[in-house]
Amino acid sequence: MARCADIPASFEKDLVTFINLTKMVNYKDLGLVNTREMFAKAIKGGYAIPAFNFNNMEQLQAIIKAAAETKSPVILQVSKGARNYANATLLRYMAEGAVEYAKELGWEHPQIVLHLDHGDSFELCKSCVDSGFSSVMIDGSHLPYEENVALTKKVVEYAHQYDVTVEGELGVLAGVEDEVSADHHTYTNPEEVIDFATRTGCDSLAISIGTSHGAYKFKPEQCTRDPKTGRLVPPPLAFDVLDAVMEKLPGFPIVLHGSSSVPQEYVDIINANGGKLPDAIGIPEEELRKAAKSAVCKINIDSDSRLAMTAAVRKVFNEKPQEFDPRKYLGPARDEMEKLYKHKIINVLGSEGKAE
Ligand code: G3H
Ligand code: 13P
Ligand code: ZN
């Protein structure tokens, strides 16, 4: 702001603060909710809330339709990359629209969270809090422990002023975490969780127990082969680490990232229609069902939706090469994603009917 000689500097500072405050949007005004009550109910009820990533309208429509029709609480998850891709302002209005769309679909009291996935700085988290997100993740898992504590605490102190809930992370997942990449995972150290949760004041904690991001969660040499189907069978998750964390922090909300199952039907459709996804492998659904019954109350799924979308689009392109109306291939992609989301809600996470 240009300085005006007649205005005292202190007044000018207040004016700038006031202007910034008037630009802020609180999630409550958009009809969104934070995760606090949702997680408490999920832990008590032995189910998990789906956290589905979205980048575009078709994904958002499919998520909202699936959640509304099953009356499942849902977390709309936005990464830094998604925010850059879709435009931050547009995304915020899309989330506002999503609440109205859910009501239009007959979901009288939608329970929808707008969550920042893998926030990598205080500034990004602040920008999300200020623009209507109801929950943010600050991912300091790649930092030295004390730096992770300090950064997470700073975000919590800011976010809690607006009743926005905060997810922290301890332990490193293998694979690519948006701006953060790691070749090898480091399981969460259960000895650190009490100190981390207490000193940061975070509302939930993402832990590392062997899941990872993307469609290649395990190398073939880590897997065995099912003699009947010839499919790769991954090694089990480290449930002993989860149990130890739950013992240290009884009833504390735990989050699992990298929880796509990489449905082989989609991989087969993609490969049969010009794609190339050799040895893609995910987390078996039985393991996620087991996790959902524990203190794991948020399960992150992105890759499965990407696979569903890609499979449907490739099939149309291959079978109808004359087609060029995007609605003719994005429509089937949207239907396939809706089917996938409903399947997760009903058959894997158990969150159906928990937001009547
Ligand atoms: O954890 C990563 C999510 O799948 C988001 O991925 O950064 O490519 O949007 P992205
Ligand atoms: P997937 O890649 O397994 O879908 O994990 C998504 C995720 O953890 C987003 O934060
Ligand atoms: Zn993640």
Image: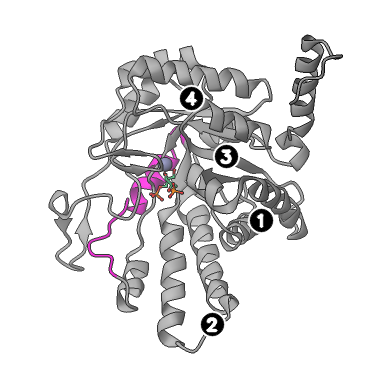
Q: Are marks 2 and 1 in contact (CB under 8 Å)?
A: no
The residue tagged with tag 1: helix, strand or loop? helix
Q: Are marks 1 and 4 in contact (CB under 8 Å)?
A: no
Dot 4 amino acid type:
Gly
Point out the tag, 1 or 3, that comes first from the N-terminus.
1
Q: Residue furthest front?
A: 5
* Magenta-span inclusion, residue 289: yes
Residue 276 appears at what percent x and percent y?
28, 69
Residue 65 appears at what percent x and percent y?
63, 60
For residue 324, which numbered disc appears in the image? 2
Of residue 273 and residue 109, the one placed in the foreground of this image is: 273
Hey, which quadrant is residue 180 in on the image?
Answer: top left
In space, the residues marked 1 and 3 are separated at their CA atoms by 18 Å
Dot 2 amino acid type:
Phe
Bin the neighbour count of mark 3 within 10 Å (Cα to Cα): few under 14, some 14-19, many 20 and up.
many
**Residue 247 in view, yes or no:** yes
Nearest-to-viewer mark from 2 and 3: 2
Bin the neighbour count of mark 4 within 10 Å (Cα to Cα): few under 14, some 14-19, many 20 and up.
some
Residue labelled with disc 1: 68
- The residue segment tinted magenta is 276-296
- 130 with respect to 300 (left or right): right
Point out the tag, 4 or 2, that comes first from the N-terminus.
4
The residue tagged with tag 4: helix, strand or loop? loop
Of residue 94 and residue 353, the one placed in the foreground of this image is: 94
In space, the residues marked 2 and 1 are separated at their CA atoms by 31 Å
Point out the tag, 2 or 3, that comes first from the N-terminus.
3
In space, the residues marked 1 and 4 are separated at their CA atoms by 28 Å
Q: Quadrant of the N terminus?
A: top right
